[in-house]
Structures are given as C-alpha cells and as structure tokens.
Amino acid sequence: MRTQVGIIGAGPAGLLLSHLLAGHGIESVVLEARDRDYVEHRVRAGVLEQPTVDLLRASGVGERLDRQGMVHEGIELRFDGAGHRIDFAALTGSTITVYGQQEVVKDLIAARLAAGGTIRFEAKATAVDGIDGTRPTIQFEGGELACDVVAGCDGFWGIARDAVPAGALSVYERQYPFAWLGILAEVPPSSKELIYCSHERGFALHSMRSPQLTRLYLQVDPDDAVDAWPDERIWTELGTRLAVRDGDWTLGDGPIVDKGITPMRSFVVEPMRHGRLFLAGDAAHIVPPTGAKGMNLAVNDVRILAEALAKWFKEGDEGPLDAYTAACLGRVWRAQHFSWWMTSMLHRFPEDDAFQRRLQLAQLAWVTGSRAAATGLAENYPGVVGTRG
Ligand code: RFL
Ligand code: PHB
C-alpha cells in the first residue's frame, strides 16, 4: 500500500489531519490499532476551545457540533463550601463548547469515509522505518504502508516516538501523586456550568455531556483500582466534596454507565519532528486534564502540520515544515503551565500541610475575588492567549 501521508492513530489528531489534508487534495491513510466501535465510544475530553470549534466548523465537520454542543460562558470554582463564578464572556469575551471527544471522533470518521478516505481499523502499527530518507514505511499488523511522510498521531503510548534515534529527542516530564476517577452517569447535570472543586479530601469536577448525561471526576490515589470504587462510594465522596455550606445545592445521581481511572502527567518531547516523521497531539505532549487542554492542543498541532504539508507538497517549500516544532511549542508550553497551575491550585498533594492548604485557599480567594486574577484564568482556559501557533 502506498500514500502521501501515512497517519498512525485514529484519535482526534490523526483523523483531523487526514480530513484537513483531504481539503488540500493530499492523500493519506490512517492506521488504527483498535476497532471503530472502540474509538467511537472511548470517553475522554469534553471541552472545546473557541479556536477548535472554529476550525471544525470551517473544515465542514461542525454541523452536529453546532446542534448538540453546549456553549458555556463561564465555570464555577468551588472551595470552602461556596461557589464562585469565573465569567469568561464578561472578562475576555470568550466561551467554551462542551461536546464529547468521542463525538468529534465520530463526526471525523463519518466525514472521512463519506469522502472516500481510508481508515484501517484493527491495523496496529508495529514499526516505522526510513524516516531519515525520502521513502519512509510503516509496518502494521496486516501489511506495509509506504509514504512520503509519517504522522505519529498515536497518543502517549504509541510507537511513532520510539522511531526517533535515541538522543535526538529531549523529554520534559512531571508525574503527579494522584489520578482521576471519571464516571459518566445517566442523570441530568446538577449545574448549568462546570464546577471545579477544591476540598480537604481532594479535587472533584462536575461536567456534562448532554442535558441527560453528567460527567464527574474525583481525585483518587494513583494506585487505586476501579474495584476500590463501587458506585455507592463514588456518590458519597462526590456528595461530600461538592457540598455547599448553605446546603442550597444537591448533586443528582443515576446509573453509572462508564467508569475509569487516569493517571496524571505533564510531558513534552522536543523537537516534534525527526526527518520525515512528525509527532502530533498526545504522541508529543500530555497535560493533566485539569486545564481541559489536551484535545485542543492536538487539534492545533494538526492545523499547523496540515498547512505546512500543503506548502511542501504543492510548492516544494519546506520552510513551514522546518518551523513546525517552533510553531506548536509556544502554545504547548503555555498550556503546560496553565494545566500545572490549575492542577496545583485545586488538588491535595500528599505532602501538603495546613500551611500549604491555607496558601491554596488564599490563591483561590484571589483568583475568584480579583478581576485581574480572574482575567488571567479567563484568558487561558477558553484559549484566548497564545492560541495561534
Ligand atoms: P489519542 O486520542 O490517544 O489517539 C491516539 C490513537 O492512536 C491509536 N494507537 C495506535 N494506532 C495504530 N498503531 C499503534 N501502534 C497505535 N498506538 C496507539 C490509539 O488507539 C488511539 O486511537 O491521541 P490524540 O489524537 O493525540 O488526542 C489527544 C486527546 O485524546 C487527549 O489529549 C485528550 O483526551 C485529553 N483530555 C482532555 N483534553 C481536552 O482538550 N479537554 C478536556 O476536557 C480533556 N479531558 C482528557 C480529558 C483526557 C482524559 N483521559 C482519559 C486521558 C479527561 C480525561 C479523563
Ligand atoms: C470533561 O468533561 O470530561 C472534562 C471537563 C473539564 C476538564 C476535564 C474533563 O478539565
């Protein structure tokens, strides 16, 4: 099999890259380890920044997003038993759209298949060769794909990054001493907006997927297994952490239809290119989910990569490909800092003492009480500053 761009991974990065390249008349083949049903039902991110929404819409995959996406003008920060709203619309004129990552994935798969695109499901890539030459190849379970360029969009656990010779990549990494337990429950959301909650017992997050589906997260021990969290325990813990002092709010519960534990990590490799291999999305960088940035960064990478590949294929201009890493990294590191900052402000760390807790509460009081500080959050969260690579 032969194509122009061999794409490993049918997550948001790989699928959107294939879709954007098709818009430039460039051929690609997407190789995905899992089956279609699995990737279309993997529950993950839920928050789209405005530039992400704009790009999906402009490239022709915004129809269902416009109908079903929920536009939010702010979020709530809850601590010490009281809620405080950060009003993005008033502070920076921006909004976010709540729309599940798996819905973006479904829309992109449908668009690629309708346009005659090739996505090979259950075709796990096992090796990438020849990236220092001009005819790289991808070995996969079921065959070999020859291409001009390889796009490694295979997430943090993929194989593309390993094709880069040892020593050619610098790794910057931080692990956190906690994980997130995430659930999807068949119950209407208990609030119109997302609630980020800092509590003595740990962080909790109230989010949603639709008027009938609530998405909730709890900070848990990184060694906890899902079995340690029967439904009853989850609802009790969520109720305790999210409770408000005046008792004027209750968390609705319902059947839990999805449950999983995710470790938290910050990770960046530099550069994001080696020869004919380009890394994009989680293959190149991971952020802790507290800033809701991961999918948005993946989308921004492939926006830049698709433009650069179009210049190269059509005009032979390699300049934008040479500039790919630098074009992505400004925004990647802004998101790294913001995600680390949100995580540090809202979670309990095992070594935290009473002094540290007082500092956290003082910071939360400042962020929610000062217009200048709240504007800082409102510039970063919906992706207003540093959004254009
Ligand atoms: P993905 O989505 O991991 O896709 C990679 C794909 O590659 C496949 N693959 C292979 N295919 C072929 N051969 C191989 N050898 C392969 N190895 C792997 C995998 O099966 C998969 O289909 O990476 P991509 O496209 O870079 O997208 C990144 C996003 O998925 C990720 O950043 C976000 O989900 C992060 N994230 C959030 N991002 C946001 O922007 N907003 C959020 O609100 C948000 N919340 C979250 C999140 C991630 C979470 N978890 C579970 C990690 C909340 C959570 C809990
Ligand atoms: C989600 O809805 O899954 C979600 C929302 C906000 C985050 C992380 C995840 O920061």
Image (cartoon, grey):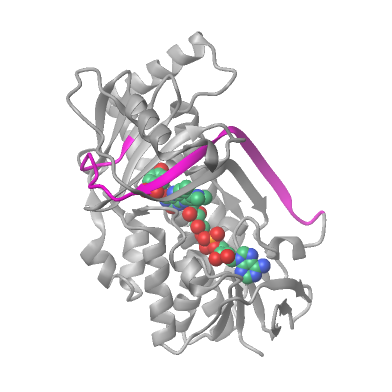
| Residue at the spot 74% in from the left edge and 81% down from the top edge | 134
Question: Residue 304 placed where, x, y %?
Answer: 50, 66
As drawn, 69 above or below 374: below
344 or 252, which is in the foreground?
A: 252
Residue 383 visible, this angle: no
Residue 10 visible, this angle: yes
- Count of labels shown? 0
Q: State which quadrant residue 164 falls in.
A: bottom right
Question: Residue 80 placed where, x, y %?
Answer: 32, 18
Q: State which quadrant residue 105 falls in.
A: bottom left
Residue found at the far right of this picture: 166
85 or 203, which is in the foreground?
A: 203
Question: Residue 245 placed where, x, y %?
Answer: 24, 17
Question: Residue 162 placed where, x, y %?
Answer: 75, 61
| Residue at the spot 43% in from the left edge and 63% down from the top edge | 41
Residue found at the far top of this picture: 355
| Residue at the spot 54% in from the left edge and 45% down from the top edge | 262
Give, as a single range, the part of the protein colored magenta.
Answer: 167-195
159 or 18, which is in the foreground?
A: 159
| Residue at the spot 37% in from the left edge and 72% down from the top edge | 107
As drawn, 85 above or below 187: above
As drawn, 6 above or below 368: below
Residue 73 is one of the magenta-drawn residues: no
Quadrant showing the N terminus: bottom right
Residue 174 is one of the magenta-drawn residues: yes
Q: State which quadrant residue 279 falls in.
A: bottom right
